[in-house]
Image (tube, rainbow, N blue to C red):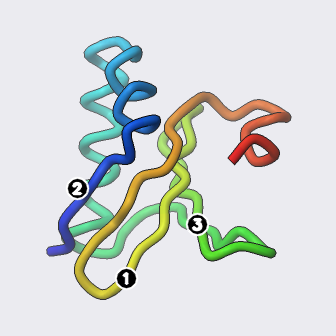
Amino acid sequence: MKTIIFSRAAYRDFEALSADIQAQIDATLDAYAMFGRGDVKHLGGRNAHRLRSGRYRILFAEDEVTILAIYIGKRETTTYLRH
């Protein structure tokens, strides 16, 4: 299992969400960290990926042992432009 780390901005994004959405995102991150399952796509032009969790997106970078969550928020037209 990989260790999940939140950037300061991602932690603030996460804390601003309702408890049920937080649980959904936790479950999605855990499934990816433990089993490599999830709707993941590499983001071209940068060393980052996106993980889809319902209407929410988690932008992250990873190495062999850690997943660094960079941004968590609803899918909008500006989601990928800002981060």
Q: Out of 57 and 54, give the one closest to the viewer.
A: 57
What amino acid type is highlighted by mark number 3?
His
41 is higher (above) or lower (below) than 30: below
Residue ranking furthest to the front: 8
Please, is residue 5 above or below residue 77 in the view? below
Disc number placed over residue 17 in the picture, else none:
none
**Circle nearer the viewer, 3 or 2:** 3
Give the amino acid type for the residue marked by disc 2 in the picture.
Asp
Amino acid bearing label 1? Asp
Location of residue 47 with respect to 26 vertically, above or below: below
Secondary structure beneath label 1? loop
Is mark 3 in CB contact (under 8 Å) with mark 1?
no
Of the image marks 3 and 2, the number of the one nearer the N terminus: 2
Which label was assigned to residue 30? 2
Q: Residue at x 36, y 23 (%)?
A: 21
Q: Residue at x 48, y 68 (%)?
A: 61
Q: Dot 2: what SS?
A: helix
Residue 70 at x, y = what percent? 49, 50
Q: Measuring from the top left, give residue 66's x and y in whole percent.
A: 27, 72
Most foreground residue, 55 or 67: 67
- Decide if residue 24 is on the left or right side of residue 54: left
Q: Mark 1 Cα within 10 Å, few/some/many (few <14, many 20+)?
A: few
* Residue that label 1 marks: 63
Q: Is residue 21 left or right of residue 61?
A: left
Query: What is the spatial separation of the Cα atoms under label 3 and label 2, in whole angstroms?
Result: 16 Å
The furthest residue to the left: 1
Q: CA distance from mark 3 to mark 1?
A: 12 Å
Dot placed on the residue nearer the N-terminal end, 3 or 1: 3
Residue shown at the point (32%, 20%) measured from the top left: 15
**Residue 63 at x, y = what percent?**
37, 82
